[in-house]
Image (spheres, helix red, strand yellow):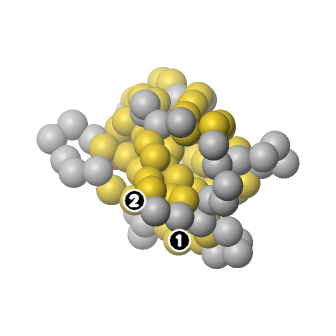
Amino acid sequence: QVQLVESGGGLVQAGGSLRLSCAASGNIFRINVMGWYRQAPGKQRELVARLTSTGGTNYADSVKGRFTISRGNAKNTVYLQMNSLKPEDTAVYYCNIAVPGNNYWGQGTQVTVSS
């Protein structure tokens, strides 16, 4: 069984920063993609950023230049550094990993940005 544990969410003022962490554990042979998604109230879940096994990255247009996704030195760990946060970044953030034949999600961590 694969588990993803997220941390780092919280309440921050506009313009502030947060760093989200996600640690994957369990029977993981290979990770193809690690990513962060978010879901705001009344909205669909959307991709925020993703990192492929070859180092390629993709970002939502709304976070380009402000957020950075990176892989940690610890095996199967991914971070999301969020700078210059805006109230519209408020959402539950979910970690996701894609392995051959499957997809796993974390439980989500709340990020609230006050104006």
Look at mark 1 in the image and give the residue it sits on. 58
Expressed as whole percent of the image width and height from the top left, the position of residue 51 reads: 61, 64
Q: Position of residue 59 (x, y in %)?
A: 50, 67
Locate residue 28, reporting x and y percent: 64, 49
**Amino acid type for the residue under numbered disc 2:** Leu
Disc marking residue 32: none
Dot 1, crowdedness within 10 Å: few (<14), some or many (≥20)?
Answer: some
Residue closest to the far top:
11
- Looking at the rendered structure, the kind of residue marked 1 is Asn
Q: Is residue 14 left or right of residue 28?
A: left
Classify the position of the C terminus by image quarter: top left
Horizontal side of 55 relative to 36 (left or right) equals right
Q: Secondary structure at mark 1?
A: strand
| Image spot of residue 95 (x, y percent) | 50, 44
Quarter-of-image position of residue 29: bottom right
Label 2's element? strand
Rate crowding at label 2 as few (under 14), some (14 to 19) or many (20 or more) other CA atoms within 10 Å.
some
Res. 47 mark: 2
Q: How many marks?
A: 2
Report if the CB atoms under discs 1 and 2 are less than 8 Å apart.
yes
Tell me which corner region of the image, top left, top right, bottom left or bottom right, holds residue 69: bottom right
Residue placed at 52% from the left, 29% from the top?
Answer: 9
Gap in angstroms between the C-alphas marked 1 and 2: 9 Å
